[in-house]
Image (cartoon, grey):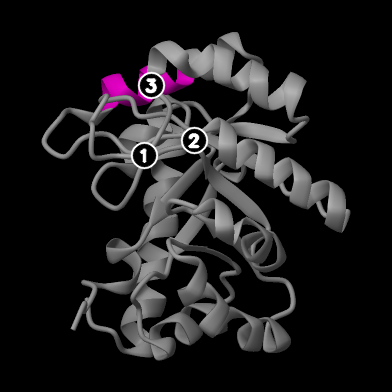
Amino acid sequence: MTGSATGLTTGLSDVRRRIDAAARAAGRDPSEITLVAVSKVQPAGRIEAVLAAGHRVFGENRVPEAAARWPALRERYGDVVLHLVGPLQTNKARQAAGLFDVIETVDRSRLARKLAEVFAATGRALPCYIQVNTGAEPQKAGVLPEAADAFIAECRDVHGLPLAGLMCLPPLGDAPAPHFALLRDIAERNGLAGLSMGMSGDFETAIGVGATIVRVGSALFGARDYG
């Protein structure tokens, strides 16, 4: 797929079709699944082509990148919903709360406490997802699976965060389904309905396991150019 407007529209239609087919194969309603178009490192023209095609839910990995592009785009597309899908530094929590509509990467007590303070101060409490490091990878953010129940309780009972669900990034090279099932099981026993899991290479598998959010970048936009 190219980065042309026509190619991007075709890519969006194809991803939506695949989501629909995967949901129906799993006996699910496709409307239960939110497509987050992950626009990190993508040129403005590609993002605007997807916006022009009618898509409104996007994900960014970094607060500075989102701050540089989305305020102006929101002036033209006021119904955009923006998810933070990358790690959040505590010192950027206030800025993130002003830029984003959903925080998907709550992963430690200090960040949870800071977000609670920011939400209380601003009166704008964003839905939060806890990131779980299902593969226990030392280089990756996320609470470990065995610590997830306690951290969920802390976020709810101590910090009062509005928890919407859980998020994960399975290890590269691993079969993703067991990681998705682990995340689903943790969510179910903690009464959380949201499951943000599945990316370009495995979102159909994630939908079969119960994903409510899939985060798709390259399958929609084409390969990223990191320059």
Horizontal arrangement in the rendering, residue 199 relative to residue 50 (left or right) = left
Q: What amino acid is at disc 1?
A: Ala
Q: Quadrant of residue 205?
A: top left
Q: Amino acid at mark 2?
A: Asp
Q: Quadrant of residue 13?
A: bottom left
Q: Is residue 29 visible?
A: no
User: Which residue does the numbered mark 1 point to in the structure image?
Assistant: 141
Q: For the residue labelled by badge 2, is the local secondary structure a helix, a strand or a loop?
A: loop
Give the class, few, some or many, for how many residues have Cα within 10 Å of label 3's Cα (few <14, many ≥20): some
Residue appearing at x 33%, y 48% in the figure: 199
Q: What residue is shown with label 3? A: 144
Mark 2 lies on residue: 107
Q: Quadrant of residue 157?
A: top right
Amino acid type indicated by mark 3: Leu
- In the figure, 195 relative to 21: above or below? above
Is residue 164 visible in the rendered structure shown here?
Answer: yes
Magenta-tinted stretch: 177-184
Number of marks drawn: 3
Q: Is residue 11 above or below residue 59?
A: below
Q: Main secondary structure of the magenta part?
A: helix
Q: Say which quadrant the C terminus sits in.
A: bottom left
